[in-house]
Amino acid sequence: MNLNGNLIIGLKEEAGSEKEVSAKNPSTNDTLSPGYKGATAKQLEHACDLANNAFYKYKNTSFEDRAKFLDTIAEEIEAVKETLLKITPEETGLPEARITGETGRTVGQLRMFAEFIRNSKHTDATIDEALPDRQPLPRPDLRLRNVAIGPVAVFGASNFPLAFSVAGGDTASALAAGCPVIVKAHSSHPRTSEIIGRCIQNAVKKNNLPDGTFSLLFGSGNIVGQGLVKNKYIKAVGFTGSRNGGLQIVKTAQSRNEPIPVYAEMSSINPVFVFNSVLENPDKFIEGFLVSLQMGAGQFCTNPGLIITKNSKNYENFKFKLAEKIKEQNSQTMLSNVIAKAYEEGVSKFKSKNNITLVGEGKKNGNANQCIPHLFETSANEFKKDQDLSDEIFGSTSLIIKCENDQDFNEIAKKIEGQLTISFHSNNVEEVSEEFVSLIEDRAGRIIYNQFPTGVEVCHAMVHGGPFPATSDTRSTSVGSKAIFRFLRPVSYQNIPKELLPKELV
């Protein structure tokens, strides 16, 4: 496949003319071609106009036709798998095995949504038949279903170039809902974005769907990012990224004449609570924890950035063993120099503090943009006093919080901000109180027992969301079939003749 660096606007391709971005090989910092010039404000408006014009026809496609479209996207992506295995590692530093797995995840979630809408599960069709003889007042015939909300803007994520990017969960769920999608490609992997964008464009053509069902734009946050959120035809936003970036988008969306929902996945340090019974023989826990911490150089939104445990007789041995294992870990290449710089700054900030202690640091290899794993320690009292210790460090760094008693342990559970996940480990279920489970349930979208948070299954029971600042809307998930409900709204049909009702309500 020849890459040309063009924008995809509906069924056509156009060259941008704003500031150019280029991918860089994060292992060497070499610039990769082609360059991608950003969309102009006029090109962005045109993409939004097309999406708005496509909406009526696309939202009224049959569920089967829409499912075939999603299946076709999956097939198109599978057809370029070998190209992805060459291109994506170059611009992300991720190994081929990761790209293979992420490709499978991406096509798998497309097919999951296809099956979900084939079975009409997204409509939530509900019928309350008329009760004309009810006293003191009759009840009219009422029927409810969910309908598509309108064109959706999706911001590609840096850390998942496939599964949370151009054809990722936000795009897949919005298209499944019946919403045209405009994606802002992430600047760190534009070549992968072009490849996947063409796959979706090809699927639109093969299924004879309206021009504007899908567009892919490159460019800066001000012109493209803010421009999309401000455009009157955009009715919802899907975002995965930093807290600052997410909050800026939320602010823009809420300041519009017509405010719109923003489903932003932002910041999570994914605490891991370790009970005393685990400290007695911690080897299995340490092994699993290190795999989770080091997965993808810690660049997962579910990376375990916090360990909370108690100062028992086995604590020092646990800390020593974990620190020694950290020292054996090798560094890994991060996704970009921007992410690597932010990681180094976060680690340096921790090292400069006098209320935490560095207890373990891994080994650095000779490549550029390396994530060296780190382990720090602090007390429960210091953690409660210092808000900086709750900040996410995006990479393989974790902080141990040493609690002196059960009260400290539970107070930490109360203090931590909203999270995507909270895990707890115990070899004796009797040492875990119902109060503790209730506390962490209030703080996270997914609570995990004796397993680790990395690895987010794509299925019907998954929640990848959580209270702020994990997400901007605690009621939603960006993974699993329930992600589709972000881009649907309920409509009630009262006393409508059967001839005019949608077929799922007849």
Image (cartoon, helix red, strand yellow):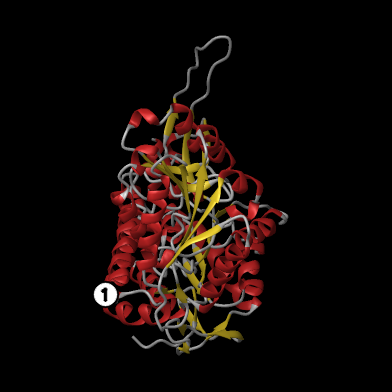
Residue under pointer 1 = 79
Number of numbered callouts drawn: 1
- Residue 138 appears at what percent x and percent y? 54, 16
Is 167 drawn above or below residue 149 in the view shown?
Answer: below
Q: Closest to the observer: 168 or 136?
A: 168
> Hey, what amino acid is under mark 1?
Ala
Q: Residue at x 34, y 37 (%)?
A: 277
Q: Residue at x 61, y 69 (%)?
A: 225
Report if residue 24 is visible in the image: yes
Quarter of the image with the C terminus is top left
Q: Quadrant of residue 504?
A: top left
- Residue 345 appears at what percent x and percent y? 59, 70
Disc 1: CA contacts within 10 A as few (<14), some (14-19) or many (>=20): few
Is 196 drawn above or below residue 150 in the view shown?
Answer: below
Task: Say what secondary structure mark 1 lies in.
Answer: helix
Is 500 drawn above or below residue 142 in the view shown?
Answer: below
Q: Closest to the observer: 400 or 154?
A: 400
- Residue 406 appears at what percent x and percent y? 50, 33
Q: Quadrant of residue 366?
A: bottom left
149 on left or right of 427? right
Q: Closest to the observer: 319 or 472?
A: 319
Report if residue 237 is visible in the image: no
223 on left or right of 401? right
Q: Residue furthest top?
A: 135
- Residue 284 appears at what percent x and percent y? 28, 50
372 on left or right of 344? left
Quarter of the image with the N terminus is bottom left
Q: Residue at x 61, y 44 (%)?
A: 381
Q: Closest to the observer: 445 or 71?
A: 445
